[in-house]
Amino acid sequence: MNISNSTELICFIILSTIVVCGGIGVVLLENIVYSAFLLGGVFMSVAGLYLLLNASFVAAAQVLVYVGAVNVLILFAIMLVNKKEEMNEVKGLKLRKFLSGFVCIGLLILIIRVNITTAWPLPGPKSIGEESTIRIGEHLFTDYLLPFELASVLLLMAMIGAIVLARRDVYFENENISPSNNIIKQSKTPLIADKSSN
Amino acid sequence: MIASISINVPLQAYLIVAALLFCTGVWGLINSRNAVRVLMSIELMLNAVNINLMAFSSYLDGELIRGQVFTVFVITVAAAEAAVGLAILLSLYRNRVTVDMESFNLLKW
């Protein structure tokens, strides 16, 4: 075992420990702000795993998109809806937790069993290493051109949809739309149209 | 030699890490009361799938790394999903003034 192999093994162990423990922490921690920051740590460690797999482009994309965009978006959402709220008790929640825990452990055992018993055709073709970015570009503009263009359309649709959904709705005075109508009135902005002005 | 570095860690190790992360995500998806945490669990599951794709692409498909291209697409879709999901959550919060998943029963008869 030379030094690069042992370094790789140590890095893998550290990163996978962070990934697994961080994932459990994201799910189990009481304070959701801690969970969000821990989620950023998990994303960074997953990017480190990608670097171990010779995929520098995808690792950079992971850091940019997940840590830079998705995690910040989640933090914004938490800040916007962060209100200490007393969750009222729901019957059978404990039972549900246990049952779903059993189901998840069963799923885990099933996946690991399949993983170990399957005869993977190893070793595969030799990895192209650092040329992977060039290869990804070739793929994106030849045989994956249509999904690439569709992805851009999807992003445009998601952007417009998110703007439409998150915008403050225009309500008229005499309409009684939701039971919490007074809350909408309290947060009135100039965006809300007045019926008399129409 | 960078290209021959992936000999020491077996493929199965990556798959086991991904399986653990995925099952954690499933459990959190079922049991979270906070709607933001549900979205976080979905992100965890997507990341687990991405780890699988990347591991297979590196170990079994080293020539034409198709798994990496798929991972790029999955990251794109995950970003779109997160944006729309959080927008839906904000508009729900504006109507219901809560993020408790148990109180989102508008579609119940």
Image (tube, grey):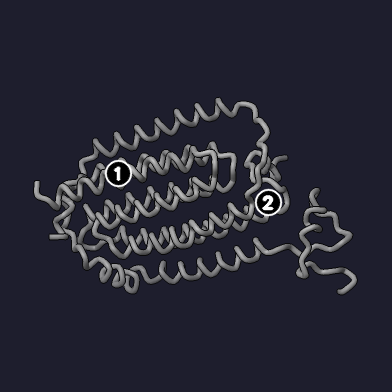
Residue type indicated by callout 2: Tyr
What residue does disc 2 label?
B93
- Residue type at mark 1? Leu
Question: Are the residues at dot 2 and dot 1 in contact (C-beta closer than 8 Å)?
Answer: no
- At 55% from the left and 64% from the top, the residue drawn is A158
Residue at (85%, 69%) from the top-left corner? A194
Tell me the distance, in whole angstroms, between the alpha carbons under discs 2 and 1.
37 Å
Q: Which mark is residue B15?
A: 1
Q: From this view, report whether residue A25 is shown above or below residue B4.
A: above
Secondary structure under badge 2?
A: helix
Residue B15 figure quarter: top left
Q: The C terminus of chain B appears in which quarter of the rendering?
A: top right
At label 1, counting other C-alpha atoms closer than 10 Å, the crowd grade (few under 14, some 14-19, many 20 or more) is many
Between marks 2 and 1 in the image, the one whose residue lies nearer the viewer = 2
Residue occupying image coordinates x 64% and y 51%: A81
Res A177 quadrant in image: bottom right
Q: In which chain is the residue bearing label 1?
A: B
Residues at marks 2 and 1, common chain? Answer: yes
Q: Is residue A181 left or right of residue A17?
A: right
Instruction: Give coordinates of residue A65: x percent, y percent.
Output: 43, 62
Q: With respect to residue B36, does A194 lie above or below?
A: below
Q: Residue at x 59, y 29 (%)?
A: A93
Q: Nearer the viewer, residue B53 or A43?
A: A43
Query: What chain is tagged by disc 2?
Result: B
Measuring from the top left, give residue A130's x and y in whole percent: 21, 65
Instruction: Tell me the quarter of the picture where residue A30 sits.
Output: top right
Mark 2 burial class by Cα count in 10 Å: few <14, some 14-19, many 20+: some
Nearest the camera: A24 or A196?
Answer: A24
Mark 1 lies on a secondary structure that is: helix
Q: Estimate the x, y position of residue B55 in percent, counting from the top left.
A: 27, 51
Q: Is residue A66 left or right of residue A185?
A: left
